[in-house]
Amino acid sequence: MKMPDRWLASPWRRGLLAVLSGALPMLAFPAPSLWWFAYVALVPWMLLARSAPTGRRAAYDGWLGGVGFLVAVHHWLLPSLHVFIFVIAALVGVLWAPWGWLVRRFLAGTPSAGRLAAALVVLPSGWLMVELVRSWQGLGGPWGLLGSSQWQVEPALRLASVGGVWLLSFLVVAVNVAVTVLAAVRRPRVLAVAGLVATVAVTSAAWVWSPRPDVVGRARIAVVQPGVIAGSGSPEKRFAREEALTRGLAGRDLDLIVWGESSVGYDLTHRPDLADRVAALSRETGADILVNVDARRAGHPGIYKSSVLVGPQGLTGERYDKMRLVPFGEYIPFRPLLGWATSVGKAAGEDRMRGTKQVVMDVGHGGLKVGPMVCFESAFPDMSRNLARDGADLLVAQSSTSTFQHSWAPEQHASLAALRAAETGRPMVHATLTGVSAVYGPSGERIGPWLGTSASTAAVYEVPLADGVTPYARFGAWPVHVSVLVLIAWGAVEGGRAVRLRRTSPPPLAPPARTVRESPVRHGR
C-alpha cells in the first residue's frame, strides 16, 4: 500500500481532507476574488472522491466536501448563527453526496474514453442539480453558486447573458473535470485536452454570437449611503444623515435617488411628518426618492420590508414588499422545530411578512421604469429576469449588510449585481446603508467606483440604459433543463445496461445433492 493510500485509510483523516478540499472554492469569491482559481478549485475534492474504495465512501467525501464548501463560503454568518451554521451545513451538504458518488463512478481507476467523455457532461450536470436544489429559499438561496465567482470576467459575463450563472457553473465544473483527468488519468489525456479545447471553442462562439445590449439612453442615479449609525435613537439619526446627504444632491439633474434597505424605520403612512420630509427632499433635488421601510404597517399584522417611492407630492403609491426572506435572519423555517436557533445566535425573533408579487415602478416624468428588489433577492436570477421581462429599464437592489460589516459578505453581495445586469441586459444599482454600494451597466460592467464599508456619502452615476432581450431573459435557466435531460438519459442508459447484464449472466450453479446423512454426493465417482 502506498503512503498516501495508507494515510487516507483513516476515515477521520479522509473526512478532514474532504472538508478542506470542499472549502477551497471560497478563494474564488470576494473578497479574495481569485476568479481563475475556480477552474481548478474542485480538483483536489474530485481526486479524493475518485480514490474512494467504495461508492459509499465517495458519497461521504461528497457530503463532507459540501459541508466544507458551505461553511467556507458562508463563514461570515458565524457571529450570527454560531454553532447553528454547522448544523445547516451538515444538512444541506448531503446534496453533494450523490455528486461524490458520480465522481467515483466516472473517474475511478482507468476509465474508458467513452466514460470520460460522458463525465465531461454528466458531472457538471450533477453539480447544477445540487445548485438548483440548494437555491430554494428555504435552504439558504443561491448564494455562492460557483459561476458567480466569475462576476468580473468580461467573457464570462457575456456567457451569463446566454445561459445565466447556471451556464457559468456548468463550464467551470467541466474545466475542473478535464483538469482532474489530466492530473490523475494517464492514457486518455488526449480526450481531456479535447474537452478543454471544446470548452474554449463553445465559449468563443458564444462570445461572438451573443447579442450585445443596445444603449438607448442614460439616467442619472444617485446612491445615498449613510454609513454605520448605531446606539440609541439610531433610526432617527440615520434618517437625519440620509436627509443631509440627499439635500447635498440638489442641482445635480437626477432621475432617481436610492436609499438603502431599512433606511426608514417607520411606516410612512403612519408618520406623515417623515413622508413630508422626504417629499421636500424630492422637490429640492428634482428627483423621486426610493426609500426602504422596515416597520409595522398600519392596519396590517407584522413587519414588512418595503421599497416605497416618494415624489414631490409625497407617497406615489408605488410600493414593493419583499417576497423572499433571509432564512434565520428574517424568519425561522419550521419555527416550532428550529426556534431554538434564537438562543444561540442572532436569528429572527419574529418572522417578517412576505409580499405577494413583483412590481415595476414608473419613476418621475421621464418614463423610467424601475424594478426593485430587497437585499437577499438580488441573489435570485429569476427575480431580476422577471422584472426585465415585465419592462424594467433599471434594476435596483436595496441592501444592508451592516451586521457583517468587517467580513467578506459586503463584497460578495455587491458582486452579484454584475451577474444580474449581464443576465438581463439591464443596468443594476446595488444601494446599501453601510457599503458596499455598486452600480453596473447592462453588460455587467462596473460604473464608477464602489462605495466601501467606511464611506458615508452620496454618489451620482451616469447609468446607460439598454434595449433588447438577452437569450437568458428570453429562455431562462435552459442549462438546468439540459442538465436534467442529461441525467435522465444517463440513468436510462445505466438502467438498460443493468437489465442486459442480468439477462446475459449465467444461471447460478445448482447446490450439490445431499444424501440422507447430509453429505454431498460427489458425481462421477
Image (spheres, rainbow, N blue to C red):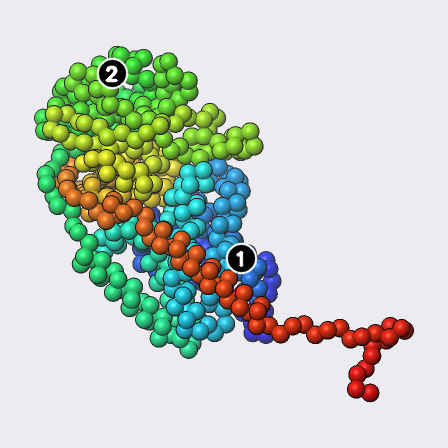
Q: How dense is the environment of label 1, judged by Cα within 10 Å: few (below 14), some, or many (20 and up)?
A: many
Q: Is residue 39 left or right of residue 335?
A: left
**At label 2, which amino acid type do we have?**
Ala
Q: Is residue 124 visible?
A: yes
Give the quadrant of the N terminus.
bottom right
In this view, the residue in front, 402 or 353, is 353
Q: Residue at x 28, y 51 (%)?
A: 163
Please tell me which of labels 2 and 1 falls first in the chain: 1
| Nearer the camera: disc 2 or disc 1 | 1
Rendered position, 518 above or below 281: below
- Residue positioned 29% across, 46% down in the render: 476
Which numbered marker is on residue 59? 1
The residue sitting at 43% across, 69% down in the picture is 115
Few, some or many C-alpha atoms within 10 Å of disc 2 (few <14, some 14-19, many ≥20)?
many
Q: Residue at x 29, y 49 (%)?
A: 164
Quadrant position of the C terminus in the picture: bottom right
For badge 1, the amino acid type reads: Ala
Identity of the residue furthest to the bottom in this view: 525
Please state which of residues 411 and 358 is positioned toward the viewer in this rendering.
Answer: 358
Question: Residue 172: which quarter of the image?
Answer: bottom left
Residue furthest to the right: 517
Quadrant of residue 273 within the rendered picture: top left
**In the rendered image, which residue does mark 2 sit on?**
275
